[in-house]
Image (tube, rainbow, N blue to C red):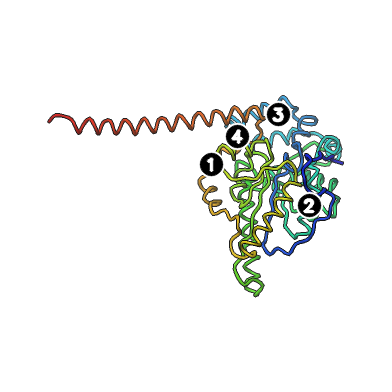
Amino acid sequence: MPSAIPPPEVPASKMGDEVPTSNKKRKIVCFSDFDGTISLQDTGHILFNTFGCGPNKRELLDAQINSGERTFKDVLEEMWGSLNVPFEDGFELMSQQLEMDAGFTGFHRFCVEEKIPFHVISAGLKPVLRRVLDEFLGEEESAKIDIVANEADIKEDGSEWKPVWRHGESELGHDKAVSMKEARREVNREVAGKKLEGEEEEEEVPLIVFIGDGVSDLPAAREADVLFARKGLRLEGYCVEHGIKYLPFDSFADIQRKLEEILEEDEKKTGGKGKPARFNPRANMWRRVSSRNAVPRYVVMTPKEERVFCGLRLLVSWLLRLIILLGIGLVLLIRGSSRWRVP
């Protein structure tokens, strides 16, 4: 069974304590990345390194994504296609090497008791993620979690692993932001239905929460009202650099405590009606102005590569600002000189 890394000691209730059920009215929907967020390693990398292309070839393929030479989807098809291992044998290795966030079990129980829909939204393969959750939580509890990910065709003898992309037209294979928008529309329809039935006196806008660790999560994060980013990893660094509001976390136990505070805050300020207290009006605007094609280049960077890349981005940003300022200065200089020109 995948093991769990204990969270840092914090002055809060013990993880095994029962979470009191509240009567909050606000509809909340939670989305979470899986690899590096719920699990502390990448499920695909564990398989590729041992039963597929190997770590050296995987790094070369990663470089092709980072350089823009190939798309994320194209490279991942090659990585998954390199596997030659029966599913059960591959999972046996993952059960030995994969570590899970120790606070996730308690957080899952909190979501169930608070009736908060929880969706795993991943660029990985749904059969792999479902099996990991079945083993870690038990099949009954795992079934309460919706997994939004790519399907897969896997031959019984393991000689072929073929992703069935959720968004085949996307260079990502699975565009998380699109999936979040689909889910948000579904929730809005549900809320609208309750209003028509007289269950809601005032329109309720659901609070959308996203939990992630990498810059590849950014398109989905921009669709969220509340963003949680794992401390010290790429998503947090990107948020700091670009002034994007986020809440840091070490463990899902931290997220649970913060969500309890947000629920209480929203109940006091809005009574659970209308827009959430932490409503993000810029979510859709952010998505429209973001560059989808740039996202895959971040997906598989090592921390060192990420620091170098972000440093280059910052340098280019300052150079562009300098060029703009020089251009403005040149225009003003030309205008000034023409004003004093002798006829």
Instruction: Give the farthest residue toward the front.
Output: 11
Q: Nearer the viewer, residue 60 or 332?
A: 332
Q: Marks 1 and 4, Cα distance to the nearest angstrom?
A: 11 Å
Residue for badge 3: 58
Which badge, 2 or 4, is on the more N-terminal residue?
2
Numbered disc total? 4
Q: Is 220 situated above or below 266? A: above
Q: Marks 3 and 1, Cα distance to the nearest angstrom?
A: 25 Å
Residue for badge 2: 108
- Badge 1, how many Cα within 10 Å: few under 14, some, many 20+? few
Q: Position of residue 30 (x, y in %)?
A: 69, 53
Kindly indicate the quadrant of the structure image that contains residue 202. Answer: bottom right
Q: Position of residue 284 (x, y in %)?
A: 54, 52
Which badge, 3 or 4, is on the more N-terminal residue?
3
Kindly indicate the quadrant of the structure image that contains residue 207. Answer: bottom right
The residue depicted at 66 percent of the width and 65 percent of the height is 190
The residue depicted at 60 percent of the width and 33 percent of the height is 70
Of badges 2 and 1, the one in the foreground is 2
Name which residue type carries label 4. Arg
Name which residue type carries label 2. His
Q: Please tell me whether mark 1 sits on a helix, a strand or a loop.
A: loop
Side (left or right) of 6 relative to 293: right
Residue for badge 4: 297
Which badge, 1 or 4, is on the more N-terminal residue?
1
Q: Which mark is residue 291?
A: 1
